[in-house]
Image (cartoon, rainbow, N blue to C red):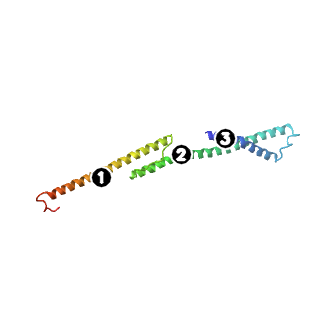
Amino acid sequence: TGVAVVTLFLGVSYLAPTFFERSMMGMMGGNVSGMMGGLSQSMTQDMNDYGARSFRGAMTSSLLLATGVALMAAVAASYLFSQRIVAPVRRMAQASRRIASGQYAERVPSGGSDELGALGDSFNQMAASLEETERRRADLAASYQRAIVRALVRGLRAAAEAPGLSQVAV
C-alpha cells in the first residue's frame, strides 16, 4: 500500500498540472493570454464552469493513470516478493526428491534469519542425519557380511580338518 500511495501522490503532483494545461489549451484553442479581458459576466461564469469541468477531467485522467501505474508497481513488487519465497521452496523440493532417490549428501543453501533460512537449516540437519544413518546401515551390513563369510570359512576349515570328512564333497 505504501508503494501505491507514493505512486498516486507523484502521479497527482506531476501529471495533474500537465493534463489540466492540455485541457485548457484545447478549450482556449491554444491561446490562453488575453482571453478574459472585456467578457460579460455570463461569459466569465461559463468559462469558470468550463474551467472547473476541465480541471476535474484533468484530475480524473491523472488519477486513473496514477492508479494504473500503482497497480503495475504493486504487481511487480508482489511478483518479486513471491519469488523470494517460492525459489527456496522449489530448491528444497528438488533436494528432497534427490534425497529420496538415495543421494543423501544433498544440501540446500541455508542462512538468513527468516523462517525460510530456519527451514533450510532444519532441512540440512535432516539430510545430514539421514546420510549418517545410511552410512551406519551400510557399515553394519558390510560387517554382517564379513562375519557371515568368516563363519562359513571357519566352518569349511573345520569340516575339512575333521577326521573322516576329507572325502565328503563340498
Judge from the rendering whether residue 40 lies leftward or rightward of residue 14; answer left or right.
Answer: right
Under mark 3, the amino acid is Leu
Residue under label 3: 8
Q: Between 72 and 151, which is closer to the camera in this rendering?
A: 151
Q: Between 40 and 25, which is closer to the camera in this rendering?
A: 25
User: Which mark's residue is nearer the viewer, 3 or 2?
Assistant: 2
Judge from the rendering whether residue 152 lies leftward or rightward of residue 34; answer left or right.
Answer: left
Circle number at residue 99: none
Q: Residues within 10 Å of mark 3 (few under 14, many from 20)?
A: many
Q: Quadrant of the C terminus?
A: bottom left
Q: Residues within 10 Å of mark 1 (few under 14, many from 20)?
A: few
| Between discs 3 and 2, the one toward the N terminus | 3
Circle number at residue 142: 1
Q: Residues within 10 Å of mark 2 (few under 14, many from 20)?
A: few
Under mark 2, the amino acid is Arg
User: Which mark's residue is nearer the viewer, 3 or 1?
Assistant: 1
Residue under label 2: 84
Are discs 2 and 1 less than 8 Å apart at CB? Answer: no
Badge 2 element: helix
